[in-house]
Image: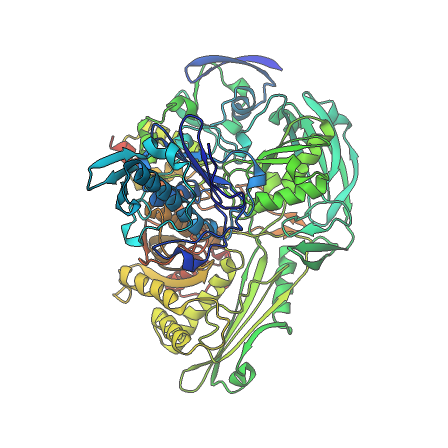
Amino acid sequence: MKNTYSRRSFLKVSALSGGGMMLGFNWFAKDIKAANLAPGGLNVDPEWVQVNGYIKITADNRVTIMAPNPEFGQNVKTSLPMIVAEELDVDWKAVVVEQAPYNTSLYVRQFAGGSQSVRTTWKPLRAAGATARQMLREAAAQTWNVPVEEVSTKAGNLYHEKSGKSATYGDLAAKAATMPVPTDAPLKPVKDFKIVRSSQKNVDGVNIVTGKSLFGLDYRAPGMLIAMIQHPPAFGLKLKSLDAGRSRKMPGIKDVFTITVFPEGYERAAFDTRTFNELVVVVGNSTWEVMNARKKLNIEWEPITETKETVNAWGRKREELIPAGLESSEAHLNKMLEMAQKPATQLRKDGDPESAFQNAARIVERTYTAPFLAHNTMEPMNCFAHVTETEALFVTPLQAPEFAEKTLAKRLELPVEKIDIQMTRMGGGFGRRAYPHYMVEAALISRQVKAPVKLVYTREDDMTYGIYRPAYTATYRAALDAANNLTGFHVKGGGIPEHAVHANRFPAGAVDNYLAEGWEIPSNITIGAFRAPRSNFIAAAEQSFLDELAEVMGKDPIDFRLELLKRAKENPVGTANDYDADRYAGVLKLVKEKSNWGSPEKSGLHRGVAAYFCHNSYAAHVIDMTMKDGQPAVENVYSAVDCGIVINPDAAANMVEGAVIDGIGNALYGALTLKDGVPEQNNFNSYRIIRHNEIPRHIEVHFVENDIDPTGLGEPPFPPVFGALANALYRATGKRYYRQPFSKEL
Amino acid sequence: MAKFNLKINGKTRQVDVDPSTPILWVLRDHLDLQGTKYGCGIALCGACTVHLDGMAVRACQLPVSAVKKQEITTIEGLSETGDHPVQQAWLEHDVAQCGYCQAGQIMSAVALLKNNPNPGDADIEAYMSGNICRCGTYARIKAAIKTAANK
């Protein structure tokens, strides 16, 4: 069979052995120029090299689309193949979605995070589907000896209307595989979409409700041992001595030893968070035996000394100071409030904010704080590893295989070709599984015991390991002149160990005199990305402040924001503003309409509103609540979201509902606090997670309808929930909420 | 170690384990029934919910030695193909996000409906509040339970 594809193309066609075609393509070819994807055609860049997805059409007309997901509930295993099926023009019900083959060398740029999955694959997936369809049309045109323009498609069939000829895709797939790969396959006009924008069920739905082995923790292999780590009981401590005598004698125990996750002087990559350098490991036959043996370890711990480490974040090197000491949340809060009064690093300045504040008739200043948060994925960290001196196999839930692979190659001193990472479905991620320390640990353990090993974290191990959402503070100031105009705006944010200020984000661009500043406090508590990093705090602070400011100015909170956005649109201050004022205003207007904002509040209901832009999309919420026996009860939530074209509306609504519930839960209850370096929460008896009886009675999700290419959904609806809740709580209790979690302030 | 004969999903299975071993780990480590999930180990998240003679129990806190002749039903025993009305309702409402907690949620819901075939909001909230979902699919779970109740 003649292969007509170029080796360096992003699209590769080949024949299937039983007759049929396979079109390979790259899901992550993100260099497709937008201009090339206007309806009517695309130009394929010949430099695209990696093929990592495929469409298979067999002679009996079975269509398979491969999903190379990391899937952690954002439903990309369903929504991404839908995009391919749309352009291919097949019946979605007849499509089989296949799990990616286990070969990570193909999965460059594969990453679940930053609300990027749909946004970065939208164009390559459309291109792939359209190209396969075009080749089938070419095959039909040749077979029937008619012009290709006259060949139409519908639901996996080809038609020539004039002659009345028709064929299934399967009939002509073998011939299509011999066609040259076109570089100008026409794309469907958005208005003709049939699959995209229609609600389709989760392709793993049946597997989930029947309890199939889908998750990392479910994986088993012959001869597999179970391993657990014991980390220091407090941040700021390290291993001094180990007496494993009693543990070793326990039934089912194979070995007890220590591992060094990242050795001294190791130059860490961005996700190589090192919380505890040295860990004690217990390995045995079964989970329960290892758990019991671990309790018999006799370990002495000692204080760490201050160290400096180099972190190489994609070529940008920075020094990270890890201070000694046993840190406490109470001291953290005091130190943050102290730092908030001191000079900080300027991040952006427009106009003359100093004069605006000096000449102000009135200044409003408020300070907001939030604690560390633990991700608490329902499936704790775990990793299966079978690692020898020459090769390594991993089966594990993870968000960032590409980064993990590089870290493992470096730490294990293996070439990447010798590292095989198989991704399982993830029992939650929220950012936590971007940090591959647990894979390094599993690898070192497997090498040591010379056997396949599954490393299992207990809930307590997971919650007390660090990699938390940072603890934050933000101080907002507004200057008002005698005529009640907003003349100056100042945000100064800080955190442990990093701040949450997005200097170019609204209301930057809407105020003449603007100042953004940041400060940081080093810590030995490790932190990591948490659903909508930084935004998840700063939106709460900013949106609470804007609400209070509107009240001071005697304005409606939605109208006040719309006024500022009008200014940012018509006469923006500065050029680096990172948001689109029209789209931002759009979600506010939609939520205003859908919530019937401005109508008299129903008796006993108190409303709050907030909006935010992050991760390329826009979201606004109106929350109606009451107080029952001194406890908040959310009655209604109206959500408006602009994420461009919505692929799978019902699944997208599910994601927004989840963000609303997750946001209310974290705002009211979320907190990981420390005393003398020890986390004060280590399981769900001390860390409060929102439950069935605490959710809103009614959540209504509305999407802005437009034809903008999809811009992401997992994170954007989450941050504004905190602000909308704080503002509703104020209406309900007459008290402003400056410190999270709000339940502690009621 | 001791031998135990357990009735699980209609079959008798023998295991040789420490008597203190929770049923959760017996199922997962010794019987290759991975549908019952580990979430907290202290009966506070509901991910490991199974039925003991039809009653919902947390398998992480149930030692194998405490189970005598009682019948254990796991998610695998509910229906292999997903045609139990509660599973069907879950599919109809496309409840799951990550999906990890859903087996436990379903087992709790089935037990709830067995005792209360037509539960109201307050009944569902009270009964189900022992099952955590970090993705926040609670509203759909509630809707699915109501749908299943009507079948």
Residue pictured at 78% horizontal, 45% vertical: A302
Q: Looking at the image, which is closer to me, A703 or A692?
A: A703
Considering every residue shown, the one lying at the far right of the view is A241
Query: Which of the colour schemes (rainbow, by chain, secondary structure, one colour) is used?
Result: rainbow
Which of the two residues, A130 or A293, is positioned nearer the viewer here? A130
Q: How many marks can you see?
A: 0
Q: Is residue A625 left or right of residue A573?
A: left
Report the side of B57 relative to A641 (left or right): right
Location of residue A294 with respect to A596 vertically, above or below: above
Percent coordinates x, y for residue A19 in the rendering: 40, 28
Q: Position of residue A268 (x, y in %)?
A: 69, 50
Q: Is residue A607 above or below residue A150?
A: below
At x 27% / y 43%, what residue is drawn?
A: A152
Q: Where is residue A9 in the image (x, y as percent from the top left)?
A: 50, 46
Would residue B3 be visible to someone looking at this image?
Answer: yes
Question: Which quadrant of the view contains residue A335?
Answer: bottom right
Whether residue A676 is visible to the viewer of this picture, yes or no, is: no
Above or below: residue A26 compared with residue A637: above
- Residue A402, image quadrant: top right
Residue A649 at x, y = what percent?
33, 48
Residue A336 vertical position relative to residue A94 in the rendered view, above or below: below
Left/right of residue A235 with respect to residue A170 in the rendered view: right
- Which residue lies at the image location 55% right of the left edge and 32% below the top edge? A217
